[in-house]
Image: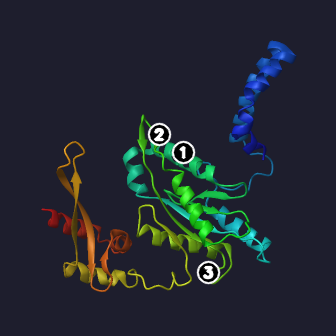
């Protein structure tokens, strides 16, 4: 589109040449008009809706990427176009490890800067036709353009390239911020239904599995993943008994001084000693804690262990 073309790097790189050509062939008057017209046109296209754009895709305010629904629609479109199986698409779900804590620490303005830098790094790995979109507060989803010989190994390699794109620290306020990614992916023939929604849901399930092995984990959707017995089944009822029987408590992770190497403190981490599923991390039971309104009780239990 004209809007995307004017905001893209290729055309912006030619602005100096356009200005010089205007001066050469039209003199100072032409140069002044070009200098005024280019920024005015960019501002107009950014803020004024164009005819026929009323139903344009909603976009993320921080990165200007489309939202997750665009990926689902792209998957549906590509699945319909590849009904003979000669080419394949796939969905990937990407999440910044410990993103909530990172963004809370750096603040809102720096979060926007980081998200833009991360989306640019991810975009540098992708091909024309691949669609990257925002998902949640610190995640992305991706649909791949139709590709021949797209298989499990090639998706693992792509996920690794996406992770390597963030191996160099992101510059922020004169310092480098290290970011890692957890990634889940799904080939469309793996879920029971061959639809864009099923494929994207499969990638998100695989991401959930990757988060349990974070940081930097990569997981693939498998047909039994959604049928696998998860600790979340019956979790709300079991929590009441867990608090009463002291199954939930704190583990202590040492904090080391970078100057001396000595232990300088401890971080208290909530853990549930589940009788059937073993040691559960907070991500496995915090949603149920919040649903039952037991956050205060959890805080009291951890604080009591700490003291």
Residue toward you, 79 or 39: 79
**Residue 173 picture location, percent across and down:** 43, 35
Q: Which residue is under mark 3?
A: 191
Q: Is residue 13 above or below residue 132?
A: above
Residue positioned 38% across, 81% down in the render: 231
In screen coordinates, is 138 left or right of 1? Answer: left
Quadrant of the rendering where the C terminus is positioned: bottom left
Q: Which residue is under mark 2?
A: 171
Instruction: Kindly state the secondary structure of the residue where label 3 is placed.
Output: loop
In screen coordinates, is 191 left or right of 108? Answer: right
Q: What is the CA distance from the residue labelled 3 to the residue labelled 1?
A: 33 Å
Query: How does the figure colour the protein chain or chains?
Result: rainbow
**Labels 2 and 3: the sequence-earlier one:** 2
How many numbered tags mark residues here? 3
Other residues around mark 1 within 10 Å, as few (<14) / some (14–19) / many (≥20): some
Residue positioned 77% across, 25% down in the render: 17
Instruction: Kindly state the secondary structure of the residue where label 1 is placed.
Output: helix
Q: What is the CA distance from the residue labelled 2 to the residue labelled 3?
A: 40 Å
Dots 1 and 2: beta carbons under 8 Å? yes
Q: Is residue 11 above or below residue 222?
A: above
Dots 2 and 3: beta carbons under 8 Å? no
**Labels 1 and 2: the sequence-earlier one:** 1
The residue at the far top in this view is: 28
Q: Is residue 110 above or below residue 294?
A: above
**Residue 168 picture location, percent across and down:** 48, 46
Q: What is the CA distance from the residue labelled 1 to the residue labelled 2?
A: 9 Å
Instruction: Kindly state the secondary structure of the residue where label 2 is placed.
Output: strand
**Residue 305 picture location, percent across and down:** 16, 67
Q: Which residue is under mark 1?
A: 117
**Labels 3 and 1: the sequence-earlier one:** 1
């Amino acid at each position: 589109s004209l809007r995307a073309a004017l905001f893209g790097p290729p055309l912006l790189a030619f602005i100096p040449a356009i200005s010089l050509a205007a001066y050469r062939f039209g003199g100072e008057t032409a140069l002044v008009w070009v200098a005024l017209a280019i920024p005015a046109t960019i501002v107009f296209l950014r803020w004024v809706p164009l005819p026929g754009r009323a139903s344009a895709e909603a976009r993320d305010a921080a990165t200007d990427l489309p939202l997750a629904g665009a990926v689902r629609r792209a998957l549906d479109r590509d699945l319909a176009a590849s009904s003979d199986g000669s080419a394949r698409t796939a969905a990937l779900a990407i999440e910044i490890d410990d993103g909530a804590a990172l963004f809370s620490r750096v603040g809102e303005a720096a979060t926007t800067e980081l998200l833009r830098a991360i989306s640019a790094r991810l975009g540098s790995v992708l091909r024309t036709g691949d669609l990257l979109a925002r998902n949640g507060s610190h995640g992305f989803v991706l649909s791949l353009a139709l590709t021949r010989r797209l298989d499990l190994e090639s998706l693992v390699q792509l996920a690794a390239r996406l992770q390597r794109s963030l191996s160099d620290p992101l510059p922020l306020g004169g310092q480098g911020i290290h970011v890692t990614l957890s990634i889940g992916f799904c080939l469309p023939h793996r879920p029971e239904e061959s639809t864009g929604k099923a494929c994207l849901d499969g990638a998100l399930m695989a991401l959930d599995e990757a988060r349990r092995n974070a940081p930097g984990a990569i997981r693939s959707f498998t047909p039994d993943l959604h049928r696998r017995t998860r600790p979340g089944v019956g979790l709300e009822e079991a929590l009441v008994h867990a608090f009463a029987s002291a199954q939930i408590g704190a583990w202590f992770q040492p904090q080391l001084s970078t100057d001396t190497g000595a232990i300088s403190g401890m971080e208290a981490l909530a853990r549930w000693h589940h009788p059937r599923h073993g040691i559960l991390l907070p991500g496995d039971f915090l949603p149920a804690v919040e649903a039952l309104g037991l956050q205060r009780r959890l805080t009291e239990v951890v604080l009591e262990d700490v003291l």
